[in-house]
Amino acid sequence: MMLCAQARSAALLFVASSDSPDHHEFLARQRQWSAGADLLALEAVEAQETRLVGLIVWLKSAPSQRKSSPRRAAIQALMRAGSPTLADLCQQVDVVVAVAEDAARAAEKICSIPLLMVLAPDAQLQPLLDQSRGSARTAIYQEADPAANLRLIRELLPKAITVGVLVSPRQAGLSGLRAEAQRLRFKLEEIAAANDEEAVRALRNRIGALDAVLLLPDLQLINAWSLKPILLMTIRQMVPTFGGPTADYVRAGVLAAAVPDLDRLPAQIVAVARRLAGGVVPAPVYPEATRVVVNPTVAGVLSVVIPPTWNAHAE
C-alpha cells in the first residue's frame, strides 16, 4: 500500500481479539504494509478480561522518521518487561484501531486517545459511539452500505417492485435506504420485528407479496438461528434474498451481496486514522471499497441470470 510521503506521521495501535481467527488473520495482513510504515507485532496485549493481540504501525512523513523515537523505545521496553497492557500502549500512540466488537469495547473503556472501530456491524458499534466517554470516536462499519444491495437487486431483477426488509425498533439510518429505494423505483416493505423469532414469523406472513428480501446487518433479527429458516423459506417461495455483512451469508444461501473488500480496506483505515491523529473526527462510514459475491447454485435454483461480468466475483 502506497502512503504519501508528505502526509502527517502517526503511530497507530491495532488490536484484535486473540480468540477470533478471522480478526487475527485480518490483523496479520496489515504486516504486508511495506511502503511508508514501520511495524511492530505484539503477540499478547493485556486488557483486563479481554485477550488481545496487537500491531504497532508507525506511519512516517519522512523516510527515516520513527526509527528510534522515544515512544518506540518505550514500547520496546514494555515488551521486554512482559506482555504490555493496553493502557500503557495507549500512552505511546496517536490512535487505536480496534478490530471488531470485543477489542472496541476494551479500547473504549481503557483508552482515552482517539479510537477508530472497524469490522463490526453498525448495530454493535452504535451503542459504543453513543455512550463513549471521549468525543474522538468513529467507525468504519463491517458491512457495505445496504443501498449497494438495492442496486444489485435492480440489476439482477429488473422487473422487481416490492423489496421486503426486516427492521427492529432500534434500527437507525433507514432514511438513506428509503431514498435509494425510491430512486430505483422500489416499494420498500418494512417488516417490523423485535427479535429473531418474530422476524421469521413476520417474514413468513408477508413473503407472498415480495419480489426480493434484503437482509440488514442486525444480529438481533438476522443471526445464526434465524438465517437458516429465512433462507429455506425464501428459496421455497422463489424469492431471492440479498445482503448480509459478509460473504458467509452468500455461502449459506443468500443470492448475492455487496461486501467490503478487505484487501483494500487498510487504505481507508489509514486515511481515517490520519485525520483522527490530526484532531479531526470524521463521521462513521461504510467501507468505500466493496466487491460482489454471488451464490451460483441459488441463482440456478431461482432461475436468476448472473451477468457474465460477475463471474469473477462469484463464490
Image (tube, helix red, strand yellow):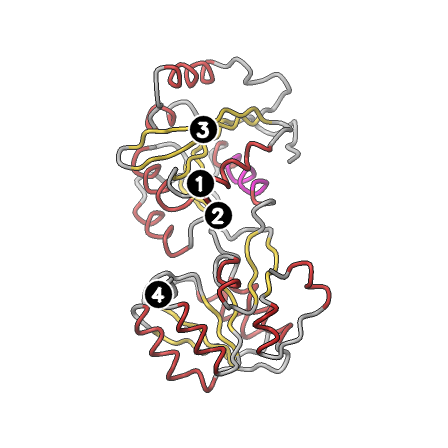
Residue that numbered label 3 is attached to = 94
**Badge 4: how crowded within 10 Å, few (<14), some, or many (20+)?**
few
Q: Check disc 2 and give the amino acid type.
A: Ile
How far apart marks 3 and 1 lie (CA) works out to 11 Å
Residue at 53 percent of width and 76 percent of height: 240
Count of picture labels: 4
Sequence-wise, the earlier of marks 3 and 2 is 3
How far apart marks 4 and 1 lie (CA) works out to 30 Å
Image spot of residue 34 (x, y percent) = 63, 29
Nearest to the observer: residue 137 or residue 153: 153
The image shows residue 26, relative to residue 92, as above or below, that is: below
How far apart marks 3 and 2 lie (CA) works out to 18 Å
SS type, badge 1: strand
Residue that numbered label 2 is attached to = 140
Residue that numbered label 4 is attached to = 225
The stretch of residues the image draws in magenta is 266-274
> Seen in the image, is 223 located left or right of residue 263?
left
The quarter in which the C terminus is drawn is bottom right
Labels 1 & 2 near each other (Cβ < 8 A): yes
Image spot of residue 186 (x, y percent) = 55, 78
How far apart marks 1 and 2 lie (CA) works out to 7 Å
Nearest to the observer: residue 147 or residue 233: 233
Residue that numbered label 1 is attached to = 116
> Seen in the image, is 85 located left or right of residue 280?
left
Nearest to the observer: residue 135 or residue 102: 102
Sequence-wise, the earlier of marks 1 and 2 is 1
Image spot of residue 104 (x, y percent) = 37, 42
SS type, badge 4: loop
